[in-house]
Amino acid sequence: MDNCIFCKIIRKEIPKKFEYESETLVAFFDINPSADIHLLIVPKTHIGGVGDITSEHSVLLIEIYQVINKLVAENNLEDDLYRVVVNGGKAQHVPHLHFHLLGGRWKKMV
Ligand code: AMP
Ligand code: ZN
């Protein structure tokens, strides 16, 4: 998607340090964090949102949770509460499916 900010990040048109990258996924810190640790896990393929998920994405969804588990461990979040949040609907700010991983102290709802 030409004008999608997350697609631009994935194509490396916008510089961004990736905390994780595979053939299918990237993860990076949210630019406007809502918690001490606020990571975004983003599929490289442009999926608009939750409502666009189909059975074709079943392996990808497992991979997303495997990466979340890896990031939880790397950021020492397992001894406290962490949340995985996926926003949807027309008020979603970036219409490219992404999973928020929030840990530490919350500042506000994402
Ligand atoms: P939402 O689509 O409502 O789940 O929110 C999109 C999230 O992406 C927000 O938490 C933003 O702070 C975050 N975000 C937007 N642009 C960037 C960027 N260039 N780098 C990192 N995070 C971003
Ligand atoms: Zn996109």
Image (spheres, grey):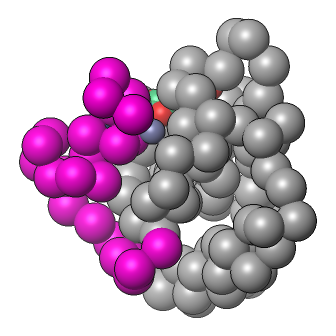
Image coordinates of residue 26 in percent, x first then y, are 41, 66
- Is 78 in front, or is 5? 5
Residue at 74%, 81% (x, y): give it.
59
Q: Where in the figure is residue 102, as x and y percent of width and height?
A: 64, 54
| The N terminus, quarter of image | top left
- Observer-nearest of 105 and 88: 88
In this view, 2 is above or below 78: above
**Does the magenta-highlighted stretch encompass residue 20?**
yes
Residue 107 appearing in the image: no
Quadrant of the rendered image containing residue 58: bottom right
User: Which residue is painted at 71% across and 37% down in the image?
Assistant: 49
Residue depicted at x 38% and y 53% = 29
Q: Is residue 40 above or below residue 95?
A: below
* Residue 87 part of the magenta segment: no
Instruction: Return the residue found at the far front.
Output: 56
Number of numbered callouts drawn: 0
Tell me residue 87's x, y (percent): 75, 33
The percent position of residue 61, horizontal first and vertical second, equals 75, 71
Would residue 109 be found to the left or right of residue 48 on screen?
A: right
Q: Is residue 11 above or below residue 13?
A: below
Q: Quadrant of the C terminus?
A: top right
The residue that appears at 40% across and 80% down in the rendered structure is 23
Q: Which residues are magenta?
A: 1-24
Question: Residue lying farthest top?
Answer: 91
Left/right of residue 6 with respect to residue 109 in the rendered view: left
Provide the major secondary structure of the magenta segment: loop
Residue 84 appears left or right of 8: right
Residue 23 visible in rendering:
yes
Pick whichever, 30 or 65, lies toward us.
65
